[in-house]
Image (spheres, rainbow, N blue to C red):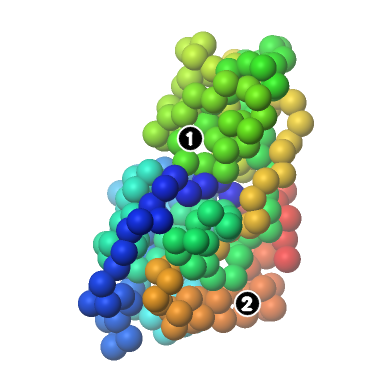
């Protein structure tokens, strides 16, 4: 999905912070601000594709789990420092991140990213000003394209930058941008889709191999029995299935 590592390789973790092997609660960290992957519903609870997936994975792995929300720009550092035990937040598996944390099996295929711009306008994708959420694979893609990158802390702010003229278009996951384009009279999907990233997985500390394996076994079982595809079709219609 979205996201690339910012620069947290220097962080370390003491053994006392590692995932407990004694049946204690496993804390799942998510952003809560990237529908339909994860968001906060009207009841103030984490909801979306990854909430439903995470609950099912914990049930299959016989883990007792609780949900924790964390801002995106510090989500990896706070995993490494022990504030939760796994990231399930639309995090694409990348080589840069894999130098700092480990990943489970992927639970989505690489998903297309799209540009959202003003309806009727054609942005300059090579020399214009393009927005993305900071620390994402979309931001990295723009930075390497020759266009001018402007980064924002949240996906909502990156969309607002297009509306207020700070950026010609925003690049983000198509599953996130398409509902916005369908509901907004002034915005539209523009240009061609971009396929970046290696699919999404849960991120865990490098020391937590048992936890990684438990989640990977559950993910692979959901792939095999078709239940993961059913969740993808429910929450991410049009996305590739397994």
Viewer can see residue 165: yes
| Residue 102 in the figure: left or right of residue 68 | right
- Which residue is found at the position 63% from the left and 16% from the top? 128
Which structural element holds mark 2?
A: helix
Disc tally is 2
Q: Above or below — where is 145 with respect to 87?
A: above
In the image, farthest residue toward the front: 10
Location of residue 220 in the rendering, given as x and y in whole percent from the top left corner: 63, 77
Viewer can see residue 234: no
- Which residue is found at the position 59% from the left and 31% from the top? 143
**Circles 1 and 2 in contact, beta carbons < 8 Å:** no
Q: Above or below — where is 49 with respect to 102?
A: above
- Which residue is found at the position 39% from the left and 76% from the top? 207
| Mark closer to the chain start, 1 or 2 | 1
Hey, which quadrant is residue 59 in on the image?
bottom left
Location of residue 225 in the rendering, given as x and y in whole percent from the top left corner: 68, 78
> For this rendering, which residue is in front, 138 or 159?
138
Mark identifier at residue 88: none
| Residue on which the image places disc 2 | 220
| Residue on which the image places disc 1 | 133
- Which residue is found at the position 46% from the left and 54% from the top? 89
Please rate how many residues cluster around mark 1, counting C-alpha atoms within 10 Å: few if below 14, some from 14 to 19, many from 20: many
Which structural element holds mark 1?
A: strand
Location of residue 97 in the rendering, given as x and y in whole percent from the top left corner: 50, 56
Hey, which quadrant is residue 58 in on the image?
bottom left
Tell me the CA gap for discs 1 and 2.
30 Å
| Residue 236 in the figure: left or right of residue 238 | left
In the image, farthest residue toward the left: 16
Please rate how many residues cluster around mark 2, counting C-alpha atoms within 10 Å: few if below 14, some from 14 to 19, many from 20: some
Say which of marks 1 and 2 sits in front: 1
């Amino acid at each position: 999905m979205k996201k690339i590592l910012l620069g947290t390789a220097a962080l370390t973790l003491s053994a006392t912070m590692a995932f407990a092997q004694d049946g204690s609660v496993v804390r799942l960290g998510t952003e809560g601000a990237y529908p339909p992957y994860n968001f906060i519903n009207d009841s103030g609870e984490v909801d979306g594709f990854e909430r439903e997936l995470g609950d099912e994975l914990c049930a299959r792995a016989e883990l007792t789990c609780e949900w924790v929300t964390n801002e995106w720009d510090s989500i990896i550092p706070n995993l490494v420092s022990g504030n939760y035990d796994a990231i399930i937040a639309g995090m694409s598996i990348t080589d840069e991140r894999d130098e700092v944390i480990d990943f489970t099996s992927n639970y989505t295929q690489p998903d297309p990213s799209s540009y959202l711009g003003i309806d009727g306008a054609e942005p300059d994708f090579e020399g214009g000003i393009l927005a993305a959420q900071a620390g994402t694979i979309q931001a990295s893609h723009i930075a390497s394209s020759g266009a001018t990158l402007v980064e924002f802390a949240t996906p909502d702010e990156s969309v607002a930058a297009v509306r207020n003229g700070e950026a010609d278009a925003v690049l983000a996951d198509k599953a996130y941008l398409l509902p916005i384009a369908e509901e907004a009279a002034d915005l539209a999907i523009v240009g061609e889709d971009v396929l970046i990233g290696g699919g999404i997985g849960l991120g865990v500390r490098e020391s937590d191999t048992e936890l990684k394996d438990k989640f990977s076994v559950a993910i692979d079982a959901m792939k095999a029995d078709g239940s993961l595809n059913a969740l993808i079709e429910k929450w991410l219609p049009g996305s590739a299935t397994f």
